Image (cartoon, rainbow, N blue to C red):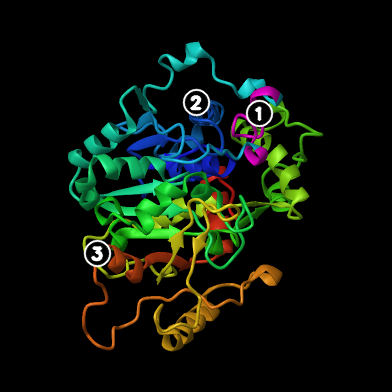
Amino acid sequence: AVDTDPGVDDVLAILLALASPELEILAYIISFGNTDVHAACENIYRLYQTIGRQIASHPEDEARFPNYAPDIPPVLVLGPEGPLAGGLHSAQYFHGRDGLGNISQSHADLNVSSEDKRGSFDSNFRYTSKSAVQVTVELLDSRPERSISYIVLGPLTGLAQLLRQHPQVAQKIGRVIIMGGALDVPGNATPVAEFNVFADPYAAKQLLSPDTPEYGLPSERVLLLPLDITTIHELPFPFYIKHIDPTFESTRRPSIASEKSPLVHFSSSFFERTREVMIEYGKDVLELHDIVAVWCALENPPDAADKKVELPGMSPGWLAVKRKFDIERTGELTVGMMVVDRRNDPTAYAPGPSRVQVQSLLERHHPPLGLLESTALPAQVEIEDPSGGSQSASDSQARIRTGIPCVVKTPGPDALLRLLMKRVWGVEI
C-alpha cells in the first residue's frame, strides 16, 4: 500500500513502483500534504493517463510497466484532509497548487476530463468511496499476515488514524517504510523539521515515539528514511537534459508534446517549475526523497524473520541503525523537529561507547554532506545492555530507548539514478 500526497517526487516514485516487477501495488491512499487531497488525487489520473498514452504510441514500452494494468487493480482511496491536530500546512510553495508545478494551467493537455475518469481507468485502479482506514484493514485481512509493506511518502496521518481505530492491525503489517524526518541535518520545511513530520507532528509522535505504545508502530518492522539519507540522492537536471530531454529548460520554454514521447513530455512538464525553485535554493537538481523510499521497499520486502527489538533484515548494500529521538509538536519555532538527546549526561544514556560506535558507523557508511554535515553528537544506537537486565520501566520508555531503525546506507546515488533511468524512461546509463 502506498500512502502518498502526490507531488513531484511522489509521482516519480510511483512511476518507479509501476515499473518494478518486485512490487505489487495494492492501494493508493491519497493524503493531504504537498497539496490538498483532491488535487493530489488528480495526479494519479494524470500519471496513469500518461503511461496509457506512452504505451499507445510506443507499444514496446508496455513490458516496462508491469504494474500499469495488473490482474487485480489497486484501490484508489482518499485519505486524511488534514492533521490529527494543529494547523494545516501544505508544500504548494514547492509543488504548486496542483502538486505538479501548476501543470494544470501550463499544460492543459495533461489534465484528465471527467468523462475519461468514468471508466477509462478500470483496468488500472479502482476508485472507492470507502474510508482509507476501512480499505487498509480489508487489505491486511485479505493477505497473509506480515506480507504487506506500507509505504508512507507523505504525512503519517492516515497510518496514525489506522492504529488509533484498529491497533491490533499493527501486527499484520510486514514492513512500514517511511520517508520523513531529519536527525543530524537541517529540515526542509523549517530549519529543523522535514515536511512530512512538520505537516502532522502529532501523527509522527504517535507512531515513532508514542506516549501510548499500543498506538505506535512495532519498531522492528519500521524503516525510516530521513533527509539525512535521502537528500544525497539526486537527479541533476543537466543529466536529465543530456539523457532524456535535450529540449528541457524551465517554464520559460514549456515542453511541447509533439516533440517528444508522452512520458518525457509529462516528466519535463512537471519538472519545469521544480527546476526554477531548486535553482533558487542553489541546486540544479531534483532531490529524490520519495524515490529512495520506494527503492528501499522494492529491495527490502517484508521478512518473517524480523523479531521484536531487532533491526529489520536488509538486502546487501543497505544498512539501518536504531536512532533515538522524540518529536516536538507545539514549539514556537520547532514544530516537527526530531529532538535527539545529545547531552553528556549519564541519566540520558552512557555516551562513551554509544558515541564511538555511532560515529565510526556514520563515517564508514554515510557520505559527507559538505558544509551542512553535522558534527554534533549523534543519537545513540542500540547497544548491548551491560547489566543484562531490562532497560525500561514501561513499554513507552522501552520503545523510546530501543529506537527506530533508520536507513544510513543505500547502494548509492549512482545506483538509484541508473535504476530510475532504465525503469522509468527506458534509458541505459
Residue type highlighted by circle 1 = Ile
Classify the position of the C terminus by image quarter.
Answer: bottom right
Residue at 45% x, 36% y is 31
Task: Give SS at disc 3.
Answer: helix
Mark nearer the N terminus (1 vs 3): 1
Q: CA distance from mark 2 to mark 3?
A: 39 Å
Where does label 3 land, which residue?
395
The residues tagged by marks 1 and 2 sit, at their Cα atoms, a distance apart of: 15 Å
In the picture of the structure, the residue carrying the numbered disc 2 is 38
Residue 1 can be seen, yes or no: no
Direction from residue 291 to residue 69 in the image, left or right: left
Q: Which residue type carries mark 3?
A: Asp
Which is nearer the N-term, disc 2 or disc 3?
A: 2
Query: To which residue does mark 1 refer?
Result: 103
Give how far across and how far down residue 268 sits, in percent: 67, 37
Q: Is residue 220 visible?
A: yes
How many C-alpha atoms fall within 10 Å of the one at disc 3: few (<14), some, or many (≥20)?
some
